Image (spheres, grey):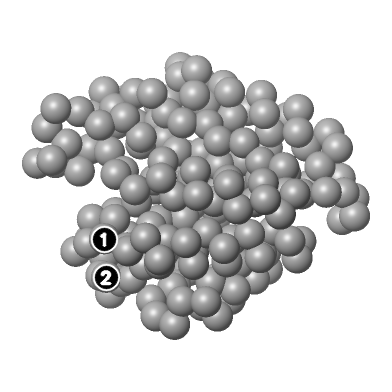
Amino acid sequence: MSSTSPPYVLLTVPHARCSAISHRVHDCDYAATRMATKIAAVLGSAGVKNEIVIGDVNRRTLDLNRRESRYTADFRERIRQLVTERSADSRMFTLDIHSYPKHHEWAGTAGYPMVFLYAGGPAPAWVGNMAALIRKNIDRGITIIDGIGPVNDIQDELHTLGFEAVLLEFNESNTAPTEEQLARAVREWAENL
């Protein structure tokens, strides 16, 4: 696809389905659907085509972001279908949306409002550009952790198929104004693709 083609952003939320014990174990991402919806709304208001695919299986039953779900879950088939269809006339970007509890951390990131996880080696420039725009709007705690390997299978599969994807982790204790700032920064990134 040409660099002048319009962008299309697919937002995936694999861990949306909570269970009766989700309050005791983190088996769903409490803020992920809310953040995906906010990002989709601000992208749409800027004229950036987008779509959300929300998982309907609790991760304790089947983790929709692991290899065992790749060919067994309707959620994953829908992602492949959309990526294939939309990439025909758009530059395709997938944002795999997750959230984490306040005190969880990756390499010293506890309390950060957002963490980028990029599989497959150094993150490409478009991921760095998004992180820079978010840092401009949020003056604390934005980091990219790259080269994390194939544990994030949505990303891994899309990279294997030749498509761009990144996993975005949002802190579940973010305030509503912080969530709005993060969503607007993602919109600004998309407007500058």
Q: Residue 147 location in percent, x, y?
A: 49, 61
Query: Label 1, label 2: how many angstroms apart (C-alpha)?
Result: 8 Å
Q: Can residue 117 be seen in this snapshot? A: no
- Seen at 76% across and 27% down, the residue is 85
Q: What residue is rendered at 51% in x and 38% in y?
A: 12
Rendering coords of residue 156 (x, y %): 54, 43
Q: Is residue 14 visible?
A: yes
Residue 101 vs residue 184, the one in the foreground: 184
What residue is rendered at 66% in x and 65% in y?
A: 188
Q: Is residue 76 left or right of residue 24?
A: right
> Hey, what amino acid is under mark 2?
Gly
Q: Residue at x 49, y 67 (%)?
A: 181
> Residue 149 placed where, x, y %?
46, 52
Count of numbered tags: 2
Give the vertical position of 146 relative to 153 (above or below): below
Q: Which residue is mark 2?
A: 111
Q: What residue did someone put label 1 on?
A: 173
Q: Which mark is residue 47?
A: none
Identify the amino acid type marked 1: Ser
Give the vertical position of 166 relative to 78 (above or below): below
Q: Are marks 1 and 2 in contact (CB under 8 Å)?
A: yes
Mark earlier in primary sequence (1, 2): 2
**Which dot, 1 or 2, sits closer to the camera?**
1
